[in-house]
Image (cartoon, rainbow, N blue to C red):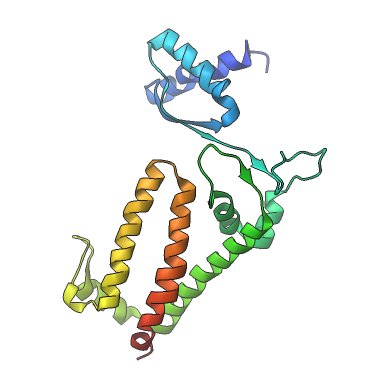
Amino acid sequence: ETDIMDVWFDSGTSHHGALLKKYGTCVADVYLEGSDQYRGWFNSSLITSVALEGKAPYKTVISHGFTLDGQGRKMSKSLGNGVDPLDVIDEYGTDALRFSLVSGTTAGNDIRYMPEKLDQASNFANKIWNAAKFIINSNVNEQDIKQFREKVYNYETKTYNADLLTIEDKWILNKLDKLVQDVSKNLENYDLGIAVDKIYGFIWNEFCDWYIEMVKSRIYS
């Protein structure tokens, strides 16, 4: 490319060169980049936008850390500690890789790649799969779904008929409602690690280990 004057100036004026031209505004909802961009793209964008408009070109800045090896070292070719994500996906699956990288992390911090976390994430994915398979294959048919929609749950008002719910149904729905509120708040604050840890605890403990066990007699009959 021969039209670049300066890489930081050019990328730092993308709020006008790209954003304003395409969307009619020079203020983005979110700028997302690595933590090294505080002195790079975040900074050059802020300086040029203040010079042109007197305000920042973004409403929110989110920075992510970098993926390190299990010993906390930067992954590099010279150390030979790099990991090909496609190889990991072939062995564990995409969801397990995503879950293991997000679980227990805080936005902006570096992430340690640890194979043992992949095993945990893979087991969790299997737990969800097996629970869903058990409920759907063994017990749910079209008549059940029709009855549920007509009598138990009103999709328009998003409310349940409490008279048709048992104590364990009310208990798990209460837990689920609390989970949705907590996770939504975590996601709004970009606390992804806290959010997925709460989902993990709910699925593994309350839903699978307690609720499914409590309703097995109803399901089988």
Quadrant housing residue 7: top right
Identified at 26% across, 71% down, the residue is 170
Quarter placement of the N terminus: top right
Determine whether 163 is above or below 70 in the image. Answer: below
Q: In percent of the image, x 48 and y 22: which residue is there?
A: 18
Q: Position of residue 197 (x, y in %)?
A: 47, 56
Q: Please state if 97 lies on the left or on the right of 62 as rendered.
A: right
Whole-percent x and y of residue 158? 22, 61
Q: Residue furthest front?
A: 71
- On the image, the x and y values in percent for residue 210 come to 40, 75
At x 39% / y 84%, what residue is drawn? 216
Q: Could you tell whether 87 is left or right of 195 in the image?
A: right
Q: Residue drawn 66% across and 49% down?
A: 113
Q: Is 13 left or right of 163, judged from the image as shown? A: right
To which quarter of the image does residue 140 belong? bottom left
In percent of width and height, residue 122 lies at 59, 64
Judge by depth and name the residue closer to the eye, 141 or 66: 66
Quarter in which the C terminus is drawn: bottom left
User: Residue extending furthest top?
Assistant: 51
